[in-house]
Structures are given as C-alpha cells and as structure tokens.
Amino acid sequence: MGLFALVFLCLYRAVFGPGVLNRIAAISAIGTKTLVILLLMGFIYNRVEMFVDISMVYALLNFIGTITAAKYLEMKGEL
Amino acid sequence: MTRVTDDIIIRTVARVFMPFIQIYALYVIMHGHHSPGGGFQGGVILGASFILYLITHGVEDAKKRMSELKAGLLSSFGLLIYSGIGLLCLILGSNYLDYGGLSTLLNVIPAQARSLGILGIEIGVGIAVMAVMFSVFFDISTGGILPEDEEDLGVNK
C-alpha cells in the first residue's frame, strides 16, 4: 500500500514539477515502482515466473523511453 | 536528425545491453505459447534493441547494422513466412492456418504439427514487427530524408 502512495507522490512531481527534467525523472521512478508492484502481484497470485517476464520488458521499455526523452530534449537544445 | 552522442556511459551501456535484449526477445518469441509474450511482443523487444542502438550511436552507424532497405525486405519476409505457412496448410488440404494439416508434411502427429506451426507463425510475426518498428522509428528520426539525399535535394542541414 505504501508503494501506491509513493506512486501518487511521484505523479504530483510529474504533473506540477518545475522543469522537464523533474518530470522525466518522476516518470522513470513511477515506472520502477510499477515494476515492483507487478512483482508483488506475482507473489500474490503465486505465478512469479510469468510476472518476472512482464516486469523485465517493463524495465527495458522504461529505460529506452527515458533515454529517448532525454535525447529529444538534447536535440531541441532545452538543456 | 539523431546526432551521435559523445556520452561514453550511454554508448557503452547500450552496446553491452544489446545482445542480452536480443536474447531475451528470442526467448519471448520461442517461449510464447507457455508464458506471456509471443511473436508481436518479442518483435517489439527486438525492435527496441535496434532503436536503442540508433538513439545512442546515431543514424550513420545504425544504417550499417540495419538499413532502411533491409528493414523493408525483412518486414516483407516475415509476412511471407506467415502467409506461406498459412497457404501451405491450405494446399495440404486443411483450412488456412490450420496447422494440423502440416502433420503429413512434417511426418509427426497433428498435436506436434500444431506446436511447430504456431512457432513458425510467431517467428514470422516477430521478424515483421521488428522490421516495421525499426523502419517507423528510422523514418521519424530522419524525417524521411537520408543524409545522402540532402545534397541532391539541396536541403540545408
């Protein structure tokens, strides 16, 4: 339950945060927390081996998305 | 236009990660009928590895690994595998994509033929999705204009 509250704290930073970099970092943190929540759901449903696959893909796409957003900002010269 | 970054951390991480991402994508494709995943999801992961390479190493290096022409050919090739297996089932006397008909050709029982047929379909879908993902990202990042065309068209860099 604590993780859900932390997700909403990060969401506040992502919506109202000053600057684009804060938002990117907040969205990346939300992605990481979602991954942990997915794994905990796997333990609840007793099918961890399936949820590990999903969470690995989630981590990978989160990583690539963050890099792409940072690259886009560098290209636009906003840093 | 995606430039070449001089950030050594990002470049090294991308270069080290790429084989592992691709191995994982192959696992998702091959293991798709026992666990979440399948052809489309594995193809997306496989395409993501090439997109990561394009982002970190720039368009010029990425074109040496996977050019636009190669991506177009691969997407057609994946579709050819898919529809080829489907038509093969049709020729062998069963419905389209009914893999049980492959059992006479592969000389196995129909259950095994279904398992092998769906594996072939997933490989075809994976190749097609990977190539289409990469070519969409490639076209967006270059704006449809390749560096060698810019001199011909007189477009300012």
Image (cartoon, rainbow, N blue to C red):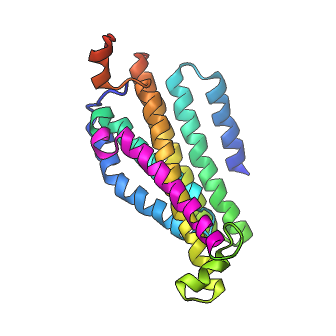
Range covered by the magenta-colored residues: B62-91
Q: What x and y, as percent, mark residue B69?
A: 37, 41
Q: Does the magenta stretch include residue B66?
A: yes
Residue A42's image quarter? bottom right
**Residue at the spot x=60%, y=23% of the render?**
A17
Please say whether residue A66 is visible from this viewpoint. no
**Residue at the spot x=74%, y=51% of the render?**
A1
Q: Which of B118 and B80 is in front in this view?
A: B80
Q: How many marks?
A: 0
Residue A18's image quarter? top right
Q: What x and y, as percent, mark residue B5?
A: 29, 31
Q: In this view, does A26 lie above or below A76?
A: below
From the viewer's perspective, is B46 left or right of B82?
left
Residue A53's image quarter? bottom right
Q: In this view, does A31 lie above or below B40?
A: above
Please say whether residue B110 is visible from this viewpoint. yes
Q: Is residue B19 above or below residue B85?
A: above
**Residue at the spot x=48%, y=59% of the render?**
B25
From the viewer's perspective, is B146 left or right of B125?
left
Q: What x and y, as percent, mark residue B93?
A: 68, 76
Q: Is residue B95 magenta?
A: no
Q: Is residue B103 above or below residue B65?
A: below
Q: Nearer the viewer, residue B99 or B130?
A: B99
**Residue at the spot x=55%, y=88% of the render?**
B107
Q: What x and y, as percent, mark residue B55?
A: 38, 36
